Structures are given as structure tokens and as C-alpha cells.
Amino acid sequence: MSEPATRSLGATLTDDGAEFAVWSRHADRIELCLFDAEGKKEIARLPLTEDGEEHRLFVKDVKHGARYGFRAHGTYDPDRGLWFDPSKLLADPYAREFDRPFRYDPRLGIFGEDTQDLMPKAIVARDIPVKPAKPLFQPGGLIYEIAVKPFTMLHPDVPEEKRGRLAALAHPAVIAHLKRLRVDAVELMPITAWIDERHLPPLGLTNGWGYNPVAFMALDPRLVPGGVTELRETVAALHAEGIGVILDLVFNHTGESDRFGPTLSLRGLDNPTYFRHQPAEPGMLVNDTGTGNTVACDQPAVRRLIIDSLRHFVLHAGIDGFRFDLATVIGRTARGFDPEGLTLRSLFADEVLQDRIMIAEPWDIGPGGYQLGNFPAPFLEWNDRARDDLRCFWRGDGGKIGDLATILAGSSSIFGRDGRMQTRSVNFLAAHDGFTLMDLVSHEHKHNEANGEDNRDGHNENYSWNNGVEGKTDDPAVLAKRRADIEALLSTLFATRGTLMLTAGDEGGRSQRGNNNAYCQDNDITWVDWAALDEELIGHTAWLAGLRRRFPALRDLQFFHGDGDILWFSATGLPMTVPDWEAPDARFLGMAIETTDNDTGGKTRLAVLINRGREQLQAALPAAPAGWSLLDAKGQMHIQSDLTLAARSVSFLVEN
């Protein structure tokens, strides 16, 4: 019998069998359960040998494809934080594949109720390594946020058997759309194994977004039935077209939820270690996530699981980077958020991970949970302040000209602290949470009635407006206003310095009927209706993306230094004055920046003129010896000194 070369956790294949290993500090003993090829009949139950805090067993003749799970013995006393119940079949935290999806059943949380028939079985898998290349995506580029199933379910060119699957992203029609938008990386909303929240099945609803994980490495069979092979092949197809892949991962909580939730994996293996509890109350789970439990990311065993999960995706699929949901949890210790915490720092200390792109959602709902700007470099951070300020500016709120300029210049007030010279902002107008871009300009209020919670769920303040009619309308004047607002919003976003994120479908006016918390709508509320997308809006977005490629100053991360590299000007064409900045009802802002023009190879200036007013505006241009050329999707037009700006519009000009 041969032993594996490294002492890994999970199931590690050798030439003549497999070693199974799981971590638990508090379990009295752990058993391995092996199942038949259908995962239904238990064929062996074997005790693991305790090796410190690891429990291990080598089993001869186990082969690729074998099904298994664990049972943990010990004290059952939830008031003391102990949930050991050998009637519960437990998923391996290091599983790379499961034989079927997780389905919620109340019996999963009942003490003494055997769950063997309810639980998916982990699959012993042979890892096929890839040689990771340098990440294709680099900060300053365009990220395109995708929920795999909603994005592909109604795509007319994708074969039916691939719709809703990860493999659909490799279809030529999908890649053509991504390339048209000049997407630098797709950011995939969770594709790892998840379970529905327990309140959803009685409502006839399902979690369609995956932000309720059971395991951190294993891919969900609903989205990725081909396992890591399907992920690796899809990544390779996107890489071949110059498109990077970022995974949105959830390490902040698990689908085991609060003490009334199911026992699926970490809870049954070692609840006191894997989850955070109230001081002096070992039975009281901390809820910094709003989902019932908080993973104790500062625990060495959890840190190891996180690092090993990230390494797995890089080494076996070539993933370019990661976005971390409620990332403040990853930096939490018993004393609160620590930007110098070992778990956060370990992400960049690891030789496999040190060059990967890391993106933080820099908040949770716990004490001191809002940490925008406080993550260590080189973390990129979702900038919700920019999102809200851009929305408020275009809604018509007063006193927002200065905020707009700050965002256009890279949000130095947030990311320039302590003398830092580069922005780490991810600028966005809409994400999977909240309104779509079309709903932002079509609804003053959320409409989450379909979620079964009497419209109590989701954010109440969305900084939105409806252009005169709430929701759906056939009024051509209202529709024209909404479309103009979306164009202006997109133009403003693409003029900001930093990294951009666009949520799939927003480029074509996708709506969720005013639902701003659509995680449980795995149906046509969230599925992208490709036939209904606005072709002209898509073209406008593609043109904006082309501007960022043509004028690299827009993608630059350096803050402006102010000695000629940027000019802020009023509608007179002259530099902004203090009264201009302080005018509460200001509706115009002009920005001219030094840049290279990649079409000509020469140095020039790019001007961005923003008119949020509801009437057209005559604006003078800054002095330029040879004048300016107005840029639009149809080409360039020479402009000598001034320009009539349409209402609710953004114009781009290049100095001749």
C-alpha cells in the first residue's frame, strides 16, 4: 500500500487506493461512509484514525468516482456549541464534486434523524493540474458580472442542452457578445455547491444565485454537471479569446444557517471552531452576515480551507482571480476587522495566489462592518459610495458636483489615504443586489412582492427615480427619457478612473420588474430575455468600452497630480471656481484629461461634458489651438469652440 506524497485533506487518490482526511478538534471519532456507484447504498463504514486534529484513513482499491461522506461522534449539546450527531451524513469540506445538488429538508436539522438518503455524496476525483498563466485581467479593465443560469437560459443561439450551464459561456455566440462589449473578465456569481434557505421551499421558491454555500470547492451539479473539467475547459475557451475569469466566492457563512438550520458539513464536524460565537455564550452564533452564522475565518483550520480552495481553482482551472462576498468577515478576529489579519495577508503570501486579482465586497452587517477603503493593497474594492453618489447626481440631488468629480478622478478621498497614489476602486452602477440599471430609472420603490415576504426584504433606499410612471409603461416619452438616462449613466460610469463592473444585461436594458432582491427568483424575472434587449443600448455600451481602449488614461489607476493632467471646467469653458463647485443646483461638469490616443499614437486631451439638466445646454470648450472633435458611435465631427448638449447627456470630445 502506498501513501500519498502530501498530507492533504479531503480524498487523495494514489495508484492503489485513496486516503481520506478531515479536520476536527472536538469530535470523539469520525467515520468514513463509502457508497455504491449510485450513491444510495452504504457499502462500508470505517473509523478514521486520529492524527492530532486530523482524522485519516487509507482505503485500498478506492478509485476515481467513488462516493463517500463522513459521520462525526461526540457530544450533542447546542447550548454549548456542540452539534455532534452520528445520524447526520456530513459533506467533506474538501470535496471537489458531489453526485447531486443539495436540497433542503427539515429532517436535515432534526437530532437523531438519519440523513443518508437526503445528502449528496462527495465524489473521489482525480485532479488534473494546469499551469496557471499570468492573469489576463488587470485592474482598470471591464468586469462583466454573470449569473450563469439566468444569463444563458434564454439565449437563442445556445443549444438547449447547454442552457443554464457553465459550458454555455464557451459558446461562440456568447463569446461574440463579450468581445463586442470588450469585456476584460467575466465575474461568475457563485458556482459552488449551495442549498436553499429553509424559508424558500414552502413558498415554492428556490435560490437561483448560489450565495448559500455548503462546500467551498465543489461545483454545483445544476450549473456545472461536468465538474472541474467543465470549469477548466470553459476558462480555457474564454482565455483563448482574451477574457479572464473571476470567481465570486462565499466564505463568510454556510447554508447551515442559525441553530435551527440543517447540519450538513462544518457544523457537524466541529461547530465551535468553524463558526464564530458570542463571547461566553458558546451556543449563540454570531450573525455578521444576516444569514444566521458567520465563519470564523481567523481560525487556522478555516484559513487553510480558504487558501486550499483558492489554490484548487487556480491550479486545476486557471482562474484569474476572486471576488469575496461580505469580505469584511474574512478579516474579522475576536477584536473586530483587522486589515493586517493573517487570513487576508495569507492570500498574497501564497506563491500560487500572490499574483491573482482579489476583489473585496468591503462590508458586512456586524459591528464596524463597513470597511470601504480599508482593505490592504492590492485588493480591489466594490465602491458602493461611488454607486450611490452617481445615482444621486443623475436623480437630481443637490450638491453632488464635487462628489461626481471625485468619482471621475478615482475616489482619492477613499483610496488615497496615507499618501497612496493609486485607486483600487471598482466602480459600478448596479450589481446582482439591488435594481438593474433599467429598474433604477423606472421605479421609485422596490417591488419584491413575488419573494413572499410582503415586500419587507431588500433595500428600501435605492436612490432611484421612475421618469414619471412607476414600472412598466408603453408611453413613448417616458421610455425615451429612461433610455436617455441609461445612456448617460453608462457614459458617466465608463468615464470614471479605476476598474469598472457591469452586470450582465444592463447594457441592453434588462429589467427584474422592480425586484431588488431577486436571489430567490430562478425564473423569467431574472433570466435575461435576449430578444427584448435594446440593440442600440448595447451598441452604445460597446462604443463606450471602445473609448476606454482608445484612451488609456481612462483605465489608468494613478490619481491625477493636478499640474496640467486634468482640467475641471464650467459651461463657460473656463476652469471651475469655488462658486461653481458650491452651486447646489449645478447641472454641468466638464473634465479634460491628458491621454494618449491609441488610434493615432499621439498625445492629446479627452474632454467629457456632462449635462444632467432636463433642457439642452450651450457649453463652451476649453481653449485648443486646433479645436476639438466630437466623438460618437458614428465617428468624429469637428467642433471649434462650443457645443449644444442634449438634455440628460454625456458628450466626449478629443482635442485635434
Image (spheres, helix red, strand yellow):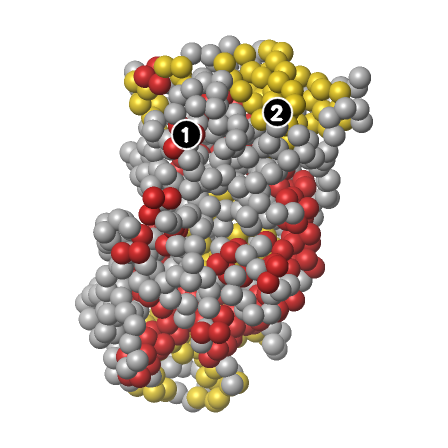
- Residue 107, label in figure: 1
Image quadrant in which the N terminus is located: top right
Q: Residue 613 or 215: which is nearer the viewer?
A: 215
Q: Residue 178 or 604: which is nearer the viewer?
A: 178
Question: Which residue is rendered at x = 80% and y = 27% of the image?
Answer: 15
Q: From what the image shows, is residue 281 above or below residue 285?
A: above
Q: Residue furthest front?
A: 41
Image-based side of 297 in relation to 78, left or right: right
Q: Residue 77 or 476: which is nearer the viewer?
A: 77
Question: Which residue is rendered at x = 62% and y = 18% of the image?
Answer: 45
Image position, residue 155 (x, y; %): 54, 67
Question: Which residue is rendered at x = 61% and y = 28% of the image?
Answer: 41
| Residue 550, quarter of picture | bottom right
Q: Which residue is mark 2?
A: 42
Q: From what the image shows, is residue 483 above or below residue 178?
A: below
Image-based side of 427 in relation to 318, left or right: left
Evaluate if marks 1 and 2 touch, with contact meaning CB atoms under 8 Å apart.
Answer: no
Image position, residue 524 (x, y; %): 42, 62
Q: Secondary structure at mark 2?
A: strand
